[in-house]
Image: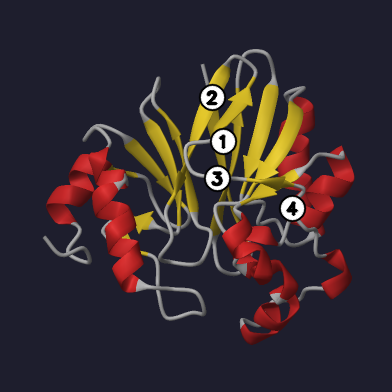
Amino acid sequence: MLKIKCFVFNPISVNTFVIYNESNDCIIIDAGNCNSREDNAIFEFIDNNHLKPIMILNTHAHIDHILGNFATVKKYDIPLASHPDGYDYFKTAYAYAGAFGIYYEDENTIYPTISLYDKQIINIGDDILEVIHTPGHAKGCCCFYNKAQGFLITGDTLFCRGVGRTDLPGGSYTELVDSIKNKLYELPNETVCYCGHGPETTIGDEKRCNYDIPE
């Protein structure tokens, strides 16, 4: 059975998730830790609980979601996985950091060594996450679904009563709505959504109350 620990990191308040199970295998989703204090917070949780990191997954490669990739890969010598449609964002991470007032060194960019694709299965010991490709907020956006326990890591595709912005390069409101309505809204209403920013929600609640998505 998977457990979820959420950290809120960096000036843009990204939700970084450590997902782990009884065998102590774990993955990190959207490592947003951006300084030594934040590094220590996530590393101490992992080490104090004797967890064994397997990989980092990026829901997408906007700068606020990848700030901790370098420190985390360096600490645990684990691979980074992301959808190939978003690989260009890694090349421009330094420029985007400056635009958002975030300190970032270009030489700290870690490039993915594992490519994610739609319906791919990520194994965490005996547990699994399914990759759902959800372009729209950015190229290469992915969500991660656990059917057995009924939860979804949505990244910036779907928020509680909102959706990810689509005015940055690679964004498309039409694609975003299509991803949500034809992929995420097909999941059971009771599916718990852990979002890239802000509080959790459910698929059913968003169908009823999310007015950013047209009927």
Mark 4 to mark 3 CA distance (whole Å)? 13 Å
Residue under label 3 = 117
Residue at x 59%, y 67% (from the top left corner): 62
Which residue occupies 60% across, 69% down?
Answer: 11
Quadrant where the C terminus is found in the figure? bottom left
**Pair 4/1: label in front:** 4
**Residue marked by disc 1:** 5
Question: Mark 3: which amino acid?
Answer: Tyr
**Residue annotated with mark 4:** 112
Residue type at tag 4: Pro
The mark that comes first in sequence, 2 or 1, is 1
Residue 190 location (% of width, % of height):
24, 32
Measured along the vertical axis of the image, is residue 1 above or below residue 151? above
Q: Quadrant of residue 137?
A: bottom left
- Of labels 4 and 1, earlier in sequence is 1
Q: Secondary structure at mark 2?
A: strand
| Vertical order, 3 against 181 (above or below) | above
Q: CA distance from mark 2 to mark 1?
A: 17 Å
**Dot 2 amino acid type:** Ile
> Residue furthest toward the bottom?
99
Q: Would residue 186 be found to the left or right of residue 64 on screen?
A: left
Provide the secondary structure element on which disc 4 rests.
loop
Question: Residue 49's quadrant in the figure?
Answer: top right
Label 3 element class: loop
